[in-house]
Amino acid sequence: PGLKVPVPCRYDEHSPDIELNRLLRAALRTATRTGDLSPHWRYRLRLQLAEFEGVTDTHSDPSWVDSWTPQPMERHYESSVRLASLILAGTSISSRFGEQPAHSFLLDMNTLFERYVTRRLQDASPDITVEAQPKSKLDETGKVDINPDIVFHQDGSPVAVADTKYKLLNAGKGEPSDYYQALAYATAYGLNEAWLIYARTPGEEPAGTIRVRNSPVTIRTVGLDLNVPIAQLDQQITALAELISDKPEPTEAPAGQLVGAES
């Protein structure tokens, strides 16, 4: 009686020094060094940084975030981790020899435009599955890879394919190479229709429709006016989703709305 008997047990020892926290700490430290940061936000960032005591201070490589799938215990981290990844990816030069970070903020607008349009199309298309960056093959033997930006599926079958282009239309037309690319995607997926989604400026000549010779494929080009409030941009993308879903839409659009007309 009174003798303590050791009881075997198994446990996990948790530490704050994990990859997610190292990424967040690195992003906070980077943000505090921004030159024109107001005293209020510098103070807020330093308060947050103090919460990461015990986390290794290192310049974290954010490239792994693109393929990261949060576990159930990490889901509340997701928006913070992806924002931290953007901060770190935009404040260093990735194509370089050496390890010295550069203080700037750069965004790949091609990627940002593509992801924004894709996400908003997903939100605006409840009856269609909008797949981002699917991998497929151009040829029957599977030797040539293709990677369209967006493929639309209905009842498990592809119904449309689209590519986003963060560049301006030229007198209502896209670049020839963009049309070749869209034609290849439509042909490989067995579709009669492909979409090219461009940026445009106010007053830009309406985009048009190209019907390919000796082919059933029609390539539709549309322009999104980016010089408008975000709510109006979302309205343009909703209109585009309706066009792709074959819902009736006018071929002419007022200023600040989606442009996509027959040529």
Image (spheres, rainbow, N blue to C red):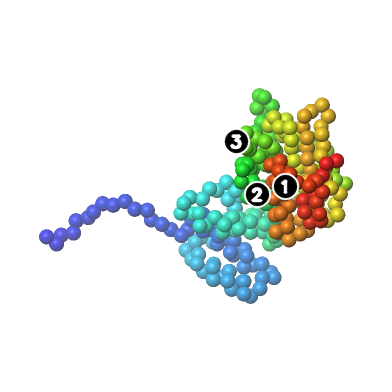
Q: Quadrant of residue 217?
A: top right
How far across and down, in percent of the image, does residue 216 sit?
77, 29
Instruction: Give the residue drawn at x 81%, y 39%.
Output: 209
Are dots 2 and 1 in contact, CB under 8 Å? Answer: yes
Please tell me how crowded label 3 is: few (under 14), some (14-19), or many (20+) other residues with Cα within 10 Å. Answer: few
For marks 2 and 1, give the CA distance. 9 Å
Task: Decide if residue 163 is on the left or right side of residue 16.
Answer: right
How far across and down, in percent of the image, does residue 237 sit?
71, 50
How far across and down, in percent of the image, does residue 91 sit?
67, 59
Numbered disc 2: secondary structure: helix
Q: Residue furthest top?
A: 141
Numbered disc 3: secondary structure: loop
Q: Which residue is mark 1?
A: 240
Instruction: Give the residue drawn at x 46%, y 51%.
Output: 72
Task: Decide if residue 26 is on the left or right side of residue 144.
Answer: left
Q: First in sequence: mark 3 or mark 2?
A: 2
Q: Which mark is residue 109?
A: none
Q: Quadrant of residue 7?
A: bottom left
* Amino acid type, callout 1: Leu
Q: Which mark is residue 124?
A: 2
* Amino acid type, callout 3: Asp
**Quadrant position of the C terminus in the picture:** top right
Q: Which residue is mark 3?
A: 155
